[in-house]
Image (tube, rainbow, N blue to C red):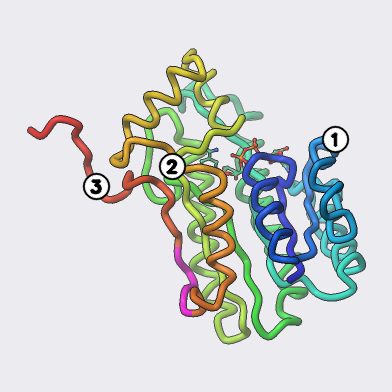
Protein backbone atom coordinates (compact mmCIF):
# COMPACT_ATOMS: atom_id res chain seq x y z
CA UNK A 1 0.00 0.00 0.00
CA UNK A 2 1.27 3.51 -0.84
CA UNK A 3 0.33 5.92 1.93
CA UNK A 4 0.71 9.71 2.26
CA UNK A 5 0.12 11.40 5.62
CA UNK A 6 0.11 15.18 6.14
CA UNK A 7 0.84 16.63 9.57
CA UNK A 8 3.25 13.72 9.53
CA UNK A 9 5.55 14.96 12.29
CA UNK A 10 2.66 15.36 14.72
CA UNK A 11 1.67 12.71 17.25
CA UNK A 12 -1.24 11.30 15.22
CA UNK A 13 0.67 11.43 11.93
CA UNK A 14 3.64 9.55 13.39
CA UNK A 15 1.42 6.94 15.02
CA UNK A 16 -0.41 6.32 11.75
CA UNK A 17 2.93 6.03 9.93
CA UNK A 18 4.07 3.43 12.45
CA UNK A 19 0.85 1.43 12.03
CA UNK A 20 0.91 1.47 8.20
CA UNK A 21 4.66 0.68 8.06
CA UNK A 22 4.03 -2.37 10.25
CA UNK A 23 1.66 -3.69 7.58
CA UNK A 24 4.46 -3.45 4.97
CA UNK A 25 3.21 -0.21 3.40
CA UNK A 26 5.39 2.49 1.84
CA UNK A 27 4.78 5.77 3.64
CA UNK A 28 5.43 9.42 2.82
CA UNK A 29 5.16 11.81 5.75
CA UNK A 30 4.64 15.49 4.97
CA UNK A 31 4.78 18.40 7.38
CA UNK A 32 5.44 22.13 7.42
CA UNK A 33 8.09 21.46 10.09
CA UNK A 34 11.40 19.99 9.00
CA UNK A 35 12.39 18.42 12.30
CA UNK A 36 13.10 14.97 10.89
CA UNK A 37 15.06 13.96 14.01
CA UNK A 38 11.64 12.85 15.22
CA UNK A 39 11.70 10.25 12.45
CA UNK A 40 15.01 8.61 13.34
CA UNK A 41 13.47 5.61 15.17
CA UNK A 42 11.12 4.96 12.24
CA UNK A 43 13.92 5.43 9.67
CA UNK A 44 16.11 2.95 11.55
CA UNK A 45 13.44 0.29 11.29
CA UNK A 46 11.79 1.08 7.95
CA UNK A 47 14.11 3.39 5.94
CA UNK A 48 13.61 2.07 2.41
CA UNK A 49 9.85 2.33 2.78
CA UNK A 50 9.70 5.74 4.49
CA UNK A 51 10.23 9.24 3.12
CA UNK A 52 9.76 12.75 4.51
CA UNK A 53 8.68 15.62 2.25
CA UNK A 54 8.39 19.17 3.55
CA UNK A 55 5.02 20.66 2.58
CA UNK A 56 2.87 23.59 3.67
CA UNK A 57 -0.71 22.49 3.00
CA UNK A 58 -1.77 26.16 2.77
CA UNK A 59 0.04 26.25 -0.60
CA UNK A 60 -1.57 24.52 -3.55
CA UNK A 61 1.78 24.24 -5.36
CA UNK A 62 3.34 22.52 -2.32
CA UNK A 63 0.45 20.02 -2.26
CA UNK A 64 0.93 19.27 -5.98
CA UNK A 65 4.65 18.82 -5.44
CA UNK A 66 3.94 16.43 -2.56
CA UNK A 67 1.84 14.22 -4.85
CA UNK A 68 4.45 14.17 -7.62
CA UNK A 69 7.36 13.43 -5.28
CA UNK A 70 5.32 10.73 -3.52
CA UNK A 71 4.49 9.03 -6.83
CA UNK A 72 8.20 9.02 -7.77
CA UNK A 73 9.11 7.52 -4.39
CA UNK A 74 6.39 4.87 -4.62
CA UNK A 75 7.02 4.28 -8.35
CA UNK A 76 3.24 4.26 -8.60
CA UNK A 77 0.06 6.02 -7.57
CA UNK A 78 -1.10 6.87 -4.05
CA UNK A 79 -3.55 4.39 -2.51
CA UNK A 80 -4.20 5.98 0.88
CA UNK A 81 -4.04 9.71 1.63
CA UNK A 82 -4.55 10.85 5.22
CA UNK A 83 -5.34 14.57 5.35
CA UNK A 84 -4.24 15.11 8.92
CA UNK A 85 -2.40 18.46 9.17
CA UNK A 86 -4.33 20.88 11.29
CA UNK A 87 -3.95 23.88 13.51
CA UNK A 88 -5.80 24.58 16.77
CA UNK A 89 -7.41 27.73 18.01
CA UNK A 90 -9.01 28.13 21.39
CA UNK A 91 -10.24 31.56 22.37
CA UNK A 92 -13.19 33.89 22.44
CA UNK A 93 -14.87 34.70 19.15
CA UNK A 94 -14.92 38.47 19.61
CA UNK A 95 -11.21 38.79 20.35
CA UNK A 96 -9.87 36.43 17.65
CA UNK A 97 -7.62 38.46 15.35
CA UNK A 98 -8.01 38.50 11.58
CA UNK A 99 -4.63 36.77 11.33
CA UNK A 100 -5.70 33.95 13.70
CA UNK A 101 -8.98 33.43 11.84
CA UNK A 102 -7.21 33.42 8.47
CA UNK A 103 -4.60 30.91 9.64
CA UNK A 104 -7.16 28.39 10.98
CA UNK A 105 -9.24 28.58 7.81
CA UNK A 106 -6.16 28.45 5.54
CA UNK A 107 -4.65 25.36 7.19
CA UNK A 108 -7.76 23.40 8.15
CA UNK A 109 -10.18 24.25 5.33
CA UNK A 110 -8.15 25.37 2.30
CA UNK A 111 -5.33 22.98 3.21
CA UNK A 112 -7.75 20.04 3.26
CA UNK A 113 -9.27 21.09 -0.05
CA UNK A 114 -5.84 21.52 -1.68
CA UNK A 115 -4.62 18.14 -0.40
CA UNK A 116 -7.74 16.40 -1.70
CA UNK A 117 -7.79 18.17 -5.05
CA UNK A 118 -4.15 17.42 -5.82
CA UNK A 119 -4.24 13.80 -4.56
CA UNK A 120 -7.50 12.53 -6.07
CA UNK A 121 -6.18 12.13 -9.67
CA UNK A 122 -3.43 9.88 -8.27
CA UNK A 123 -5.83 7.96 -5.99
CA UNK A 124 -8.18 7.33 -8.93
CA UNK A 125 -5.47 5.44 -10.79
CA UNK A 126 -6.16 2.54 -8.40
CA UNK A 127 -9.39 0.54 -8.59
CA UNK A 128 -9.74 0.98 -4.81
CA UNK A 129 -8.34 3.90 -2.84
CA UNK A 130 -8.90 5.84 0.35
CA UNK A 131 -9.04 9.48 1.31
CA UNK A 132 -9.25 9.93 5.08
CA UNK A 133 -9.61 13.27 6.84
CA UNK A 134 -8.74 13.90 10.46
CA UNK A 135 -11.92 15.54 11.65
CA UNK A 136 -12.88 16.22 15.27
CA UNK A 137 -15.73 16.03 17.72
CA UNK A 138 -16.00 19.67 16.66
CA UNK A 139 -16.88 18.47 13.13
CA UNK A 140 -20.37 17.64 14.38
CA UNK A 141 -20.75 19.35 17.76
CA UNK A 142 -20.07 22.92 18.75
CA UNK A 143 -18.10 24.13 21.69
CA UNK A 144 -17.96 27.59 23.28
CA UNK A 145 -14.64 29.40 22.82
CA UNK A 146 -13.75 27.14 19.88
CA UNK A 147 -15.96 28.83 17.26
CA UNK A 148 -13.28 29.37 14.60
CA UNK A 149 -11.82 25.87 14.96
CA UNK A 150 -15.34 24.34 15.10
CA UNK A 151 -16.28 26.14 11.89
CA UNK A 152 -13.17 24.82 10.16
CA UNK A 153 -13.75 21.21 11.28
CA UNK A 154 -17.45 21.35 10.29
CA UNK A 155 -16.25 22.38 6.82
CA UNK A 156 -14.10 19.24 6.61
CA UNK A 157 -17.17 17.10 7.45
CA UNK A 158 -18.87 18.70 4.43
CA UNK A 159 -15.88 17.83 2.29
CA UNK A 160 -15.91 14.19 3.46
CA UNK A 161 -19.58 13.78 2.57
CA UNK A 162 -19.53 15.60 -0.75
CA UNK A 163 -16.32 13.98 -2.06
CA UNK A 164 -17.58 10.54 -1.03
CA UNK A 165 -20.59 11.01 -3.31
CA UNK A 166 -18.63 12.61 -6.15
CA UNK A 167 -16.11 9.77 -6.37
CA UNK A 168 -18.08 6.76 -5.07
CA UNK A 169 -18.40 5.16 -8.52
CA UNK A 170 -14.68 5.56 -9.17
CA UNK A 171 -13.50 3.31 -6.35
CA UNK A 172 -12.49 6.08 -3.95
CA UNK A 173 -13.85 5.84 -0.41
CA UNK A 174 -13.79 9.05 1.60
CA UNK A 175 -14.16 9.05 5.37
CA UNK A 176 -13.25 11.05 8.45
CA UNK A 177 -12.04 10.12 11.91
CA UNK A 178 -13.44 12.38 14.59
CA UNK A 179 -11.56 12.30 17.90
CA UNK A 180 -12.70 14.18 20.98
CA UNK A 181 -9.34 14.70 22.63
CA UNK A 182 -6.05 12.85 22.28
CA UNK A 183 -2.91 13.56 24.31
CA UNK A 184 -0.85 15.62 21.83
CA UNK A 185 0.67 19.15 21.73
CA UNK A 186 -2.48 20.10 19.83
CA UNK A 187 -4.61 19.42 22.90
CA UNK A 188 -2.11 21.07 25.24
CA UNK A 189 -2.37 24.33 23.28
CA UNK A 190 -6.08 24.42 24.19
CA UNK A 191 -5.17 23.98 27.85
CA UNK A 192 -2.66 26.84 27.62
CA UNK A 193 -5.37 29.12 26.26
CA UNK A 194 -7.42 28.48 29.40
CA UNK A 195 -4.40 28.64 31.74
CA UNK A 196 -4.81 24.98 32.75
CA UNK A 197 -1.82 22.77 33.48
CA UNK A 198 -1.43 19.60 31.39
CA UNK A 199 -2.41 17.44 34.36
CA UNK A 200 -5.52 19.49 35.17
CA UNK A 201 -6.56 19.61 31.53
CA UNK A 202 -6.13 15.87 30.95
CA UNK A 203 -8.08 15.07 34.12
CA UNK A 204 -10.97 17.37 33.20
CA UNK A 205 -11.00 16.09 29.59
CA UNK A 206 -11.14 12.45 30.76
CA UNK A 207 -13.86 13.12 33.33
CA UNK A 208 -16.01 14.93 30.79
CA UNK A 209 -16.19 11.85 28.53
CA UNK A 210 -18.73 9.06 29.18
CA UNK A 211 -16.03 6.34 29.15
CA UNK A 212 -14.02 8.38 31.65
CA UNK A 213 -10.80 8.38 29.59
CA UNK A 214 -9.51 10.06 26.49
CA UNK A 215 -8.84 8.06 23.31
CA UNK A 216 -5.22 7.24 22.40
CA UNK A 217 -3.13 7.95 19.31
CA UNK A 218 -2.83 4.16 18.83
CA UNK A 219 -6.62 3.85 18.69
CA UNK A 220 -6.67 6.63 16.12
CA UNK A 221 -4.11 4.81 13.96
CA UNK A 222 -5.99 1.51 14.25
CA UNK A 223 -9.17 3.28 13.09
CA UNK A 224 -7.31 4.61 10.04
CA UNK A 225 -6.06 1.09 9.28
CA UNK A 226 -9.59 -0.30 9.69
CA UNK A 227 -10.97 2.23 7.19
CA UNK A 228 -8.57 0.90 4.56
CA UNK A 229 -9.42 -2.75 5.28
CA UNK A 230 -11.84 -4.98 3.38
CA UNK A 231 -14.04 -5.04 6.50
CA UNK A 232 -14.76 -1.36 5.86
CA UNK A 233 -15.52 -1.82 2.13
CA UNK A 234 -19.06 -0.44 2.47
CA UNK A 235 -18.12 2.54 4.59
CA UNK A 236 -17.87 5.86 2.76
CA UNK A 237 -18.96 9.42 3.54
CA UNK A 238 -18.83 8.71 7.28
CA UNK A 239 -17.22 10.32 10.27
CA UNK A 240 -16.06 7.61 12.65
CA UNK A 241 -16.33 9.05 16.15
CA UNK A 242 -13.40 8.35 18.42
CA UNK A 243 -14.82 10.23 21.32
CA UNK A 244 -15.41 7.84 24.22
CA UNK A 245 -19.16 8.42 23.86
CA UNK A 246 -19.12 12.23 23.80
CA UNK A 247 -21.33 12.60 20.72
CA UNK A 248 -23.96 10.08 21.91
CA UNK A 249 -25.83 12.71 23.87
CA UNK A 250 -25.83 14.65 27.09
CA UNK A 251 -23.78 12.97 29.78
CA UNK A 252 -24.53 14.23 33.26
CA UNK A 253 -22.11 12.80 35.76
CA UNK A 254 -24.92 13.03 38.27
CA UNK A 255 -28.34 11.93 37.08
CA UNK A 256 -30.90 14.71 37.43
N1 LIG B 1 -5.10 16.00 19.65
C1 LIG B 1 -6.39 16.22 19.75
O1 LIG B 1 -6.96 16.32 20.86
C2 LIG B 1 -7.23 16.31 18.49
C3 LIG B 1 -8.63 16.23 18.61
C4 LIG B 1 -9.40 16.33 17.45
C5 LIG B 1 -8.78 16.48 16.23
N2 LIG B 1 -7.42 16.58 16.15
C6 LIG B 1 -6.82 16.75 14.85
O2 LIG B 1 -5.72 15.88 14.71
C7 LIG B 1 -4.86 16.37 13.66
C8 LIG B 1 -3.42 16.09 14.04
O3 LIG B 1 -3.08 16.79 15.20
P1 LIG B 1 -2.24 16.16 16.43
O4 LIG B 1 -3.19 15.98 17.54
O5 LIG B 1 -1.39 15.03 15.95
O6 LIG B 1 -1.36 17.42 16.81
P2 LIG B 1 0.16 17.78 16.50
O7 LIG B 1 0.28 19.23 16.87
O8 LIG B 1 1.05 16.79 17.17
O9 LIG B 1 0.29 17.60 14.91
C9 LIG B 1 -0.18 18.52 13.96
C10 LIG B 1 0.86 18.55 12.84
O10 LIG B 1 0.34 19.35 11.74
C11 LIG B 1 1.44 20.09 11.22
N3 LIG B 1 0.98 21.27 10.47
C12 LIG B 1 0.41 22.39 10.98
N4 LIG B 1 0.21 23.27 9.98
C13 LIG B 1 0.65 22.69 8.83
C14 LIG B 1 0.71 23.12 7.48
N5 LIG B 1 0.30 24.35 7.11
N6 LIG B 1 1.21 22.26 6.56
C15 LIG B 1 1.65 21.02 6.92
N7 LIG B 1 1.64 20.57 8.20
C16 LIG B 1 1.14 21.41 9.14
C17 LIG B 1 2.23 20.50 12.47
O11 LIG B 1 3.55 20.90 12.15
C18 LIG B 1 2.17 19.23 13.30
O12 LIG B 1 3.28 18.39 13.06
C19 LIG B 1 -5.27 17.83 13.45
O13 LIG B 1 -5.96 17.93 12.22
C20 LIG B 1 -6.23 18.12 14.59
O14 LIG B 1 -7.24 19.04 14.22
C21 LIG B 1 -6.63 16.49 17.26
- Tags 1 and 3 in contact by the CB under 8 Å rule? no
Residue in front for this viewpoint, 105 or 199: 199
Q: Of circles 1 and 2, which is in front?
A: 1
Dot 1 and dot 2 residues touching (CB under 8 Å): no
Q: Secondary structure at mark 1?
A: helix
Residue at screen point 72% across, 72% down: 79
Q: Which residue is mark 3?
A: 249
Ligand 1's image quarter is: top right
Instruction: Check residue 37 in the rendering and tell me which mark sits there, or answer none.
Output: 1
Q: Does the magenta-highlighted stretch encompass residue 132?
A: no
Please tell me how crowded label 1 is: few (under 14), some (14-19), or many (20+) other residues with Cα within 10 Å.
few
Which residue is tagged 2? 180
The part of the chain drawn in magenta is 234-238
Note whether 90 is above or below 151 in the view shown: above
Q: Quadrant of the C terminus?
A: top left
Which quadrant of the rendered structure holds the N terminus? bottom right
Provide residue 144's location: percent of width, then percent of height: 37, 31
Q: CA distance from mark 1 to mark 3?
A: 42 Å
Label 2, ligand 1: CB separation under 8 Å: yes
Mark 3 vs 2, N-terminal side: 2
Amino acid sequence: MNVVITGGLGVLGLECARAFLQTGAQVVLADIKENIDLLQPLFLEHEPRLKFIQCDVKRHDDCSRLVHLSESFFKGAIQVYLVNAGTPFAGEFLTATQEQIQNVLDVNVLGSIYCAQTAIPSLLQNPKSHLIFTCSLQSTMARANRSIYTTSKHAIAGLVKSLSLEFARKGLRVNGIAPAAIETPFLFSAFEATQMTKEEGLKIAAESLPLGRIPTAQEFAQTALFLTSTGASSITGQLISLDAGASAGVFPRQAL
